[in-house]
C-alpha cells in the first residue's frame, strides 16, 4: 500500500519549484491532489496531466491564499470536489530582498501578506473539515532564513520566523483533535526563487562554503520531508521545524 493511499492533499503554490515536487511526490504515493496556482494556467494543466497519469484524482485552482475570501472559497470548493482534506501544505511564498534601509512599506506588506497571512488564511479554513474528521496533517513551508536570519532579507526572515511560531501554536491547539502541524525549513534549493544563486554562478560559492554537504538541495528532497510528515511515518511528530538545509544550521 502506498504511503498516502486514499488521502486528499491541498498544496498551495503547486505549479512550480518545491510545490510542484510535492504535488508529484504525494501523487506517486497515492494521494488525490488539489493544488493552487496564481498565473500560468497552461503550466498548471500540464501538471494535472502528469498527476492524472499516476492514477489519482487531481484538480488545479487559480487562487491567492493571501486573500482571506479566496482561501475560504478554495477550501469549500476542494471539500465539495474531493469530499475531505487530509493534508494541507502551505507552500506559496515570495521574496523581496533588500537591505532594511531600502525596503519600502509596500514591499514589507507584500511579503507578509503572501508568506505569513496566507498560512493563517488557509490553515483557519482547513482545520474545519480536519476537526470534523478528527485527523489531519498541516505542513508549513518556512526557511532556514526564518531560523537564523540573513542580511538583506529582513521581511522574508520575519515572515518565515512567524510561520514557525504559528506552527507551534496550532500544534498545541489541535493536537487533542489528532491534527498535526509541522514546519519545514529548507536551505538553498534549486528553484526559480534562487536562480541568482545557481551553483557555479555569482554568489553561489559564498553559500556553498557554509553548507557541509557542499551543494544546494533539489526540490524533490524537500518533497521527501513533506511526504514523511504527511504520512503515518510522522504520526507522532507535531509542533516541530525540520531543517532541510545540508547542515547549514548545525
Image (tube, rainbow, N blue to C red):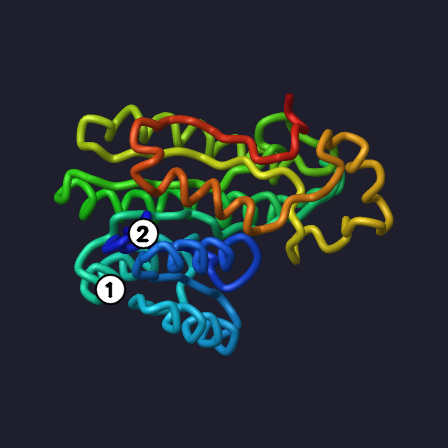
Asked whether the beta carbons under mark 2 and mark 1 sit within 8 Å of each other, the answer is no
Residue tagged 1:
77
Q: For this rendering, which residue is in front, 149 or 192?
A: 192
Residue tagged 2:
2
Q: Residue at x 47, y 70 (%)?
A: 47
Q: In this image, 31 relative to 217: left or right?
A: left
Secondary structure beneath disc 2? loop
Residue 44 lies, in percent from the top left, at: 47, 71
Residue 115 lies, in percent from the top left, at: 50, 45
Residue 147 lies, in percent from the top left, at: 58, 27
Q: Residues within 10 Å of mark 2 (few under 14, many from 20)?
A: few
Q: Residue at x 67, y 51 (%)?
A: 190
Q: For residue 159, say whether it is visible.
A: no
Q: Quadrant of residue 240?
A: top left
Q: Residue at x 83, y 36 (%)?
A: 206
Q: Earlier in the sequence, mark 2 or mark 1?
A: 2
Q: Quadrant of residue 145?
A: top right
Q: For residue 137, say whether it is visible.
A: yes
Secondary structure beneath disc 1? helix
* Disc ID at residue 48: none
Q: Residue at x 44, y 43 (%)?
A: 226
Amino acid at each position: 500500500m502506498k504511503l498516502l493511499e486514499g488521502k486528499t492533499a491541498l498544496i498551495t503554490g503547486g505549479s512550480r519549484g518545491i510545490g510542484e515536487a510535492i504535488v508529484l511526490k504525494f501523487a506517486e504515493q497515492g494521494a488525490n491532489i488539489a493544488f493552487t496556482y496564481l498565473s500560468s494556467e497552461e503550466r498548471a494543466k500540464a501538471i494535472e496531466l502528469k498527476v492524472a497519469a499516476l492514477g489519482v484524482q487531481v484538480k488545479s485552482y487559480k487562487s491567492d491564499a493571501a486573500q482571506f475570501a479566496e482561501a475560504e472559497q478554495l477550501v469549500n470548493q476542494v471539500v465539495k470536489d474531493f469530499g475531505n482534506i487530509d493534508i494541507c501544505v502551505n507552500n506559496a511564498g515570495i521574496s523581496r530582498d533588500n537591505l532594511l534601509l531600502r525596503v519600502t512599506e509596500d514591499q514589507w506588506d507584500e511579503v507578509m501578506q503572501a508568506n505569513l497571512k496566507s498560512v493563517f488564511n488557509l490553515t483557519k479554513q482547513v482545520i474545519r473539515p480536519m476537526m470534523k474528521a478528527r485527523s489531519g496533517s498541516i505542513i508549513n513551508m518556512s526557511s532556514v532564513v526564518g531560523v537564523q536570519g540573513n542580511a538583506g532579507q529582513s521581511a522574508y526572515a520575519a515572515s518565515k520566523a512567524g510561520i514557525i511560531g504559528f506552527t507551534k501554536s496550532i500544534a498545541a491547539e489541535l493536537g487533542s483533535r489528532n491534527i498535526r502541524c509541522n514546519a519545514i525549513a529548507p536551505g538553498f534549493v534549486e528553484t526559480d526563487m534562487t536562480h541568482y544563486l545557481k551553483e557555479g554562478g555569482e554568489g553561489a560559492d559564498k553559500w556553498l562554503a557554509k553548507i557541509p554537504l557542499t551543494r544546494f538541495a533539489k526540490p524533490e528532497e524537500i518533497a521527501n520531508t513533506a511526504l514523511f510528515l504527511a504520512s503515518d511515518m510522522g504520526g507522532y511528530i507535531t509542533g516541530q521545524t525540520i531543517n532541510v538545509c545540508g547542515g547549514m544550521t548545525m
